[in-house]
Image (cartoon, rainbow, N blue to C red):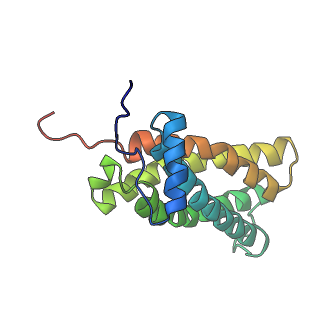
Amino acid sequence: MVSSVNRLPSYHPTRLKFVNAILDLADDVTGGRAGWLQRLFTYLCIGGFAAVVNIVIFSLVLYRVSLPFSWMTYNIHNVVANVIAAEISIMANFIPNDYFTFRHLPGHNRSWTQRCTRFHMTAISGSVLTILIEFTFVSFLHVFAILAQALALILVLVYNFSVHHIFTYRHVKSASH
């Protein structure tokens, strides 16, 4: 007769019993990866909100804000809109993700400033990828700018989530290592 071994869940229990039941099932099915799935789901929800913030700010700056330079071409205006939208959406992403998504990872022991800086480093590299992809879609494939921005954000999502796990919130090495 095989005895069942009680093990701790890989996820952090919530106050909602039905969510914990789903996470228990996910833990069983995935061999203990429900914690990762829980972080991914939270990251996608927060990232979805930040993507909406990005697209709204991008649209407002690109189509509603007149920049004071008469020499400003559409492409430069597009880059300015991207940069402003990126910074605002990075903070809209960092603050809730730092608290909800990644707070249980070892790297959360770093100071808020260190975490924010590391998050920015990852997010800025993701923003550069987003700008390059959006610019390519608009300039070479003639995709409408808002659609190009949305597609670029979706493509860069996997990169950002992975690098936040690997770099931003990885284990903090102690001085003895």
Q: Nearer the viewer, residue 79 or 161?
A: 161
Q: Residue furthest front?
A: 1
- Looking at the image, which residue is at 50% across and 65% down? 16
Residue 43, image x and y in percent? Answer: 54, 54
Q: Nearer the viewer, residue 117 or 82?
A: 117
Q: Nearer the viewer, residue 78 or 26?
A: 26
Relative horizontal placement of residue 144, taking residue 5 as reference (left or right): right
Q: Residue furthest left?
A: 176
Query: Do we see residue 142 in this rendering?
Result: yes
Q: Quadrant of the C terminus?
A: top left
Residue 163, image x and y in percent? Answer: 48, 41
- Looking at the image, which residue is at 64% across and 67% down? 53
Residue 105, image x and y in percent? Answer: 35, 49
- Looking at the image, which residue is at 38% across and 34% down? 4
Q: Residue furthest top?
A: 1
**Residue 146 lies in quadrant:** bottom right
Query: Do we see residue 123 in this rendering?
Result: no
Query: Is 2 above or below relative to 81?
Result: above
- Looking at the image, which residue is at 54% across and 36% down? 29
Q: Nearer the viewer, residue 165 or 79?
A: 165
Q: How many circles with numbers are drawn on the protein?
A: 0
Q: Quadrant of the N terminus?
A: top left
Residue 113, image x and y in percent? Answer: 32, 61
